[in-house]
Amino acid sequence: MFEYLLYMKTLQFQRDEKKNRVTVGCADGTVSVYSQCAYCRHCKGVWVGKRLNPAPQVQALEDLRRGASGDETLMNAAMMFNTLVRDGVSVECDDDAGEGFRKLF
């Protein structure tokens, strides 16, 4: 498990409370966590306190591939990701090659 974490980078949140916006510095520039990271294949999770919470949309995608999921699961994953971002401090990103945003779905 620890070896896996060594190859990822942590992108700290930059919060704009007035606009209710959370951004991070990405290879594509400054991007919104809610609209970009949430649907990027490089996003591996959100740090809340000292705990890395896996990205719920990745599990939802695996469920879709097995045919055991639907629209409700995707919506729940999106809402859970937003909750993690609200409480979190950074995202864990495995984009070490500097590719930038890559669609998850």
Image (spheres, helix red, strand yellow):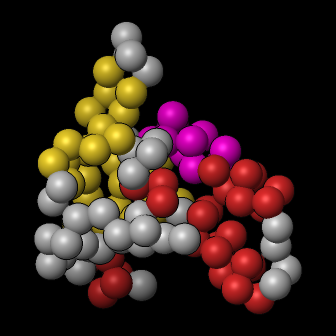
Q: Is residue 36 above or below residue 85?
A: below
**Percent position (x, y) of residue 27?**
15, 59
**Percent position (x, y) of residue 7?**
23, 80
The residue stretch that appears in magenta: 79-88
Q: Is residue 23 above or below residue 56?
A: above
Q: Residue at x 60, y 40 (%)?
A: 83
Q: Residue furthest top?
A: 18
As drawn, is 76 to the left or to the right of 19? right
Q: Residue at x 45, y 45 (%)?
A: 35
Q: Residue at x 82, y 73 (%)?
A: 69
Nearest the camera: 60 or 52? 60
Can residue 84 be found in the magenta stretch?
yes
- What secondary structure do most residues of the magenta stretch adopt? helix
Does residue 11 appear in this view? yes
As drawn, is 51 to the left or to the right of 101? right
Q: Is residue 69 above or below residue 73?
A: below
* Mark count: 0
Does residue 50 appear in this view? no
As drawn, is 93 to the left or to the right of 75? left
Q: Quadrant of residue 4?
A: bottom left
Can residue 71 be found in the magenta stretch?
no
Q: Quadrant of residue 43?
A: bottom left
Q: Is residue 33 above or below residue 71?
A: above
Assign the C terminus to one quadrant of the image: bottom right
